[in-house]
């Protein structure tokens, strides 16, 4: 079964710290890996998407990496701010031969708290 | 351009009651999805649709039904509500079956359902 796991479930850091969120997946036959941000009571906002042929993507203070051979992705947040406090979800699209390949398989999320 | 609109935002149901969660999108996306998110967990796919008149089961379809009579609308029906269906429900749509840099998922803001 294709699964996505995120550890830790929760993380608290002081403002200004650089941090790394981890995501692991069980099947290297991956089409892409996406990181989302979810604020309380809100929907999901896409942060970064890495295609299987790529190793990383960057957007501002965010950098996401993908290592298919080890089944891992990381989201690096530089100089964290209180406004970064949210739940971060990673999701994979695995290669499949039917329409179910449209689905995203989500990890359980990491709840990040950045303290002022 | 409203994106993906879900109604209602909140609902409390009694065991055995039925209800329909509404989802509509104005982006002319063919692909639409229903996910549920349990506390502290990632999202799990309930049903999806690849176009008007075509629907298929996702990972956790039991207790739910869907229909797709138009491109815009993808309602989710709960016939006999059970406490296990207490969750946050997200509708999403996409232009392409697989995510790319310019064409990703668009999520609604969610419906928080409690069954008592």
Image (spheres, coloured by chain):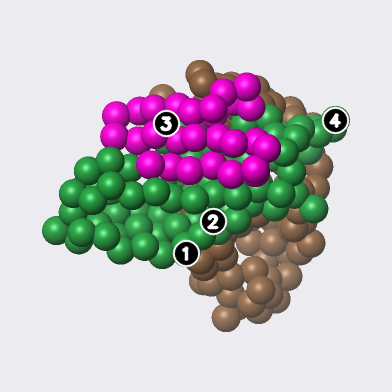
Q: Check disc 1: other Cα within 10 Å, few if <14, some if 14-19, many if 20+.
A: some
Residue at the far front: name it.
A70
**Mark 2 to mark 1: distance in Å?**
7 Å
**Mark 1 to mark 4: distance in Å?**
32 Å
Which mark identifies residue A9?
1
Q: Secondary structure at mark 4?
A: loop
Q: Are marks 1 and 3 on the same chain?
A: no
Q: Secondary structure at mark 1?
A: loop
Residue topped by disc 2: A6
Please tell me which residue lies in front, A97 or B96: A97
Q: Nearer the viewer, mark 2 or mark 3?
A: 2
Regarding residue B111, the answer to whether it shows in the image is: no
Asked whether, in this view, residue A86 is left or right of residue A110, the answer is left
User: What chain is tagged by disc 1?
Assistant: A
Q: Are marks 2 and 1 on the same chain?
A: yes
Image quarter where the C terminus of chain A lies is bottom left
Q: Residue at x 53, y 46 (%)?
A: A90
Q: Secondary structure at mark 3?
A: loop
Instruction: Based on the picture, tell me whether residue B19 belongs to the magenta stretch.
Output: no
**Mark 2 to mark 3: distance in Å?**
32 Å
**Mark 1 to mark 3: distance in Å?**
32 Å
Image height check: is B114 above or below B71? Answer: below
Image height check: is B51 above or below B81? Answer: above
Q: Nearer the viewer, mark 1 or mark 3?
A: 1
Residue topped by disc 4: A97
């Amino acid at each position: 079964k294709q699964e996505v796991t995120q550890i830790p479930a929760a993380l608290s850091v002081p403002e200004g710290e650089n941090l790394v969120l981890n995501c692991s997946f069980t099947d290297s036959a991956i089409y892409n890996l996406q990181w989302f941000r979810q604020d309380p009571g809100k929907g999901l906002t896409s942060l970064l998407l890495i295609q299987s042929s790529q190793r990383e993507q960057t957007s501002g203070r965010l950098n996401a990496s993908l290592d298919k051979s080890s089944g891992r992705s990381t989201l690096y947040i530089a100089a964290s701010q209180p406004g970064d406090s949210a739940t971060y979800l990673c999701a994979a699209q695995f290669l499949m031969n039917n329409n179910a390949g449209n689905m995203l398989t989500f990890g359980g999320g990491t709840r990040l708290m950045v303290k002022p | 351009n409203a994106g993906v609109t879900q109604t209602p935002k909140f609902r409390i149901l009694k065991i055995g009651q039925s209800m329909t969660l509404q989802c509509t999108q104005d982006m002319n996306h063919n692909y639409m999805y229903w996910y549920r998110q349990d506390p502290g967990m990632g999202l799990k796919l309930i049903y999806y649709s690849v176009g008007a008149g075509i629907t298929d089961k996702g990972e956790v379809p039991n207790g739910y039904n869907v229909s797709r009579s138009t491109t815009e609308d993808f309602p989710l029906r709960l016939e006999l509500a059970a406490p296990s269906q207490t969750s946050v429900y997200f509708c999403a749509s996409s232009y392409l079956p697989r995510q790319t840099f310019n064409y990703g998922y668009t999520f609604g803001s969610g419906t928080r359902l409690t069954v008592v």
